[in-house]
Amino acid sequence: MTGGAAIRGAVTGGAATGAAVTGGARRRPRSVAVPAECDVLVLGGGPAGTWAALGAASSGARVTLVDKGYCGTSGSTAAAGNNLWLLPPDGPARTEAVAAREVAGGHLTDRRWMSRALDRTWDAVGQLADACGSVVDVAGLRVAFLGLIELSGRMDLDERAYARLMRLEPGGVDVLITHDGPYGMSRDLRGGVQGSAKLTRLLEHLQPRLHVSGHYHHLNGPRVYGRTTSYALAQLVRPKVTRWEPETTNPEQRVTAGSVGLLDTGIGDFTYLDDDWLAEVRGDALDLTALVAAAC
Ligand SMILES: Cc1cc2nc3c(=O)[nH]c(=O)nc-3n(C[C@H](O)[C@H](O)[C@H](O)COP(=O)(O)OP(=O)(O)OC[C@H]3O[C@@H](n4cnc5c(N)ncnc54)[C@H](O)[C@@H]3O)c2cc1C
């Protein structure tokens, strides 16, 4: 960090570990300009550091968050694939889950601590859900997100987030990132049509220049919907075996073609990253930060 930062408080964001990337040349990461002054400097952008930064910023502090990689792609978080205990404050689901965990933990657990962690998780994940359907500025581009998939039940698209995006003016978003893909993008193993009709309607209404989705685990695109070019990313590392492919399909845990893309924020151009070195990247626990840094 340069520029003689005037810092009034500092928080360190948790422990750091690193998984190795096997194969592939590494290039130097880009240098990034950081503000010379802030009230709070947070070092480390794992969950601990990022929540600390969000907390300080929401109480009015000017916050700079510094990570040697990118938020959530380094440290233990990158390897963990964190699952959360997300249970509403009231109701039998929480009581039953806590009771079951007490038995599993040989009654060594502390119910008050569990309750505090569960309350905090419920509140914090609620805040993240609010970000879904919002538009944020990323390097001068208006970027919006929509999580989950069109499927009735708890995985279904968030109605409020969807409605918020549908209320925006056409062209009000440059980049739309969604979990589900547009209807008709591909077929499943039984021949069923994949994708969300509601998402297609959103694309037709919003007309972002670029749409990027996931969920179906295979490269798909570019597909053009009016003014929008849409890409689907493959699963980053396919499992060694799957329910449908019991023969080992990815024994070396190689990075899947079409799983990483690069967006040039200067001209808004998106391309799949298929450099030769990427095909050589493999391993059970990939250091995503090194991957991204090597690509830049
Ligand atoms: C295999 C595995 C599975 C797990 N599963 C779960 C789970 O299911 N549920 C759950 O709740 N927890 C799980 N955990 C635990 C959970 O992942 C960790 O508790 C959590 O990720 C720690 O977050 P953190 O922010 O404290 O640290 P980290 O995620 O390690 O973040 C530290 C950050 O600091 C940065 N950093 C380090 N040094 C520097 C430096 N010098 N300059 C700048 N930046 C720096 C790193 O790049 C990193 O981004 C799991 C952990 C592992 C390893």
Image (cartoon, rainbow, N blue to C red):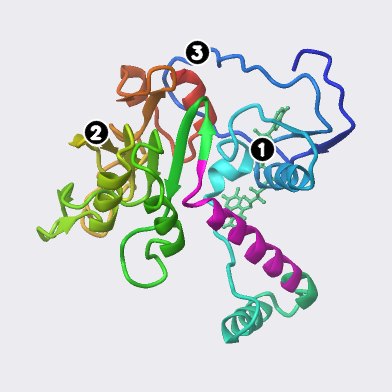
Residue at the image point whose x is 36% and y is 19% from the top: 277
Left-right relation of 118 to 291: right
Specify the quadrant of the image occupied by residue 162. bottom left
What segment is highlighted magenta in the picture? Answer: 115-135
Instruction: Farthest residue to the right: give it.
Output: 8
Pointer 3 local density, CA inside 10 Å: few below 14, some 14–19, many at least 20: few
Left-right relation of 105 to 234: right
User: What type is the residue that disc 3 sits on?
Assistant: Arg
Badge 3 or badge 1: first in the primary sequence: 3
User: What type is the residue that disc 1 sits on?
Assistant: Gly
SS class, disc 3: loop
Label 3 vs label 1, nearer the camera: 1
Which residue is label 3 attached to?
Answer: 27
| Residue 56 horizontal/vertical position (percent) | 78, 44
Which residue is label 2 attached to?
Answer: 227
User: What type is the residue that disc 2 sits on?
Assistant: Arg
Label 2 vs label 1, nearer the camera: 2
Magenta portion: prevailing SS class: helix
Specify the quadrant of the image occupied by residue 234. top left
SS class, disc 1: loop
Residues under numbered marks 3 and 2 in contact, where contact means CB atoms less than 8 Å apart: no
Pointer 2 local density, CA inside 10 Å: few below 14, some 14–19, many at least 20: some
Label 3 vs label 2, nearer the camera: 2
| Residue 272 horizontal/vertical position (percent) | 30, 27
Decide whether residue 120 is among the magenta residues: yes
Q: Is residue 132 above or below residue 110?
A: above
Residue at the image point whose x is 57% and y is 82% from the top: 93
Which residue is label 1 attached to?
Answer: 45
